[in-house]
Amino acid sequence: MSGETRIRQIVRIDEELCTGCGACVSPCAEGAIAIVDGKAKVLRDELCDGAGFCLGVCPTGALTIETREAVPFDHAAAEEIVAEKQKTYIPQVCFRCGTDEDHASLLPVRQQGRSEWVCTRCLPALIHG
């Protein structure tokens, strides 16, 4: 990838808030986030697509999206990592019914101070009680 940069959205991790729990690593399908020296880090800007699937699972709110100058997202590099991750893929499950993400769409949710996953079938009951 060339050294070109552009203004785009990218994940920012506040090291002071990060506990290193690793909850943000799995939702990042592109492999941009890893735990390094006990803290979550964006390893390579070009792997972060800025989608923010990692945000909702952070129990301390250490992850945010910022708009800044960065190298463009590299689809080819991300595809290689996604393919490698598929070899050790462990599906997330809905905390209410246990349905895994291979059988239903899951969304991150904060519930009583915990970051969890909920399926779209259970979400209305969670919202409306």
Image (cartoon, rainbow, N blue to C red):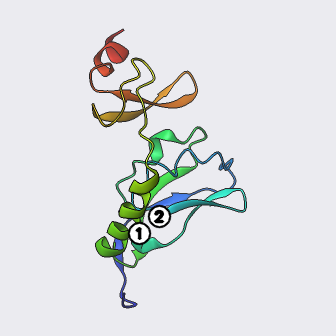
Q: Nearer the viewer, residue 52 or 76?
A: 76
Dot 2 alpha-carbon crowd within 10 angstroms: few under 14, some 14 to 19, many 20 or more: some
- Looking at this view, name the residue that lies furthest to the front: 87
Q: What residue is rendered at 42% in x and 18% in y?
A: 96
SS of the residue at dot 1? helix
Q: Between marks 2 and 1, how big is the CA–CA gap? A: 5 Å
Residue 115 is left or right of residue 71, and the answer is: right
Residue type at mark 1 is: Leu
Image position of 91 (left or right of 103): right
Residue at point 36%, 62% (across, down): 83
Q: Which residue is mark 2?
A: 32
Residue 125 lies in what quarter of the image?
A: top left
Query: Which quadrant of the structure image shows residue 67?
Result: bottom left
Q: Position of residue 40 (x, y in %)?
A: 61, 57
Q: Position of residue 127 (x, y in %)?
A: 34, 17
> Residue 64 in the image: x percent, y percent?
48, 52
Visible residue check, residue 102: yes
Instruction: Measuring from the top left, give residue 98's x and y in whole percent.
Output: 41, 22
Outermost residue, bottom side: 2
The answer to whether residue 68 shows anywhere in this view is no
User: Residue at label 1?
Assistant: 47
Quarter of the image with the N terminus is bottom left
Which residue: 33% across, 27% down? 119
**In the structure shown, which secondary structural element does the residue marked by tag 2 occupy?**
loop
Where, by quadrant of the figure, is residue 126 drawn?
top left
Query: Please, what is the three-letter code of the amino acid marked with disc 2?
Result: Ala
Q: Decide which of tag 2 and tag 1 comes sooner along the chain.
A: 2
Residue visible at 29% across and 71% down in the picture: 75
What is the crowding at mark 1: few (fewer than 14 residues within 10 Å), some, or many (at least 20)?
many
Mark 2–mark 1 CB contact (< 8 Å):
yes
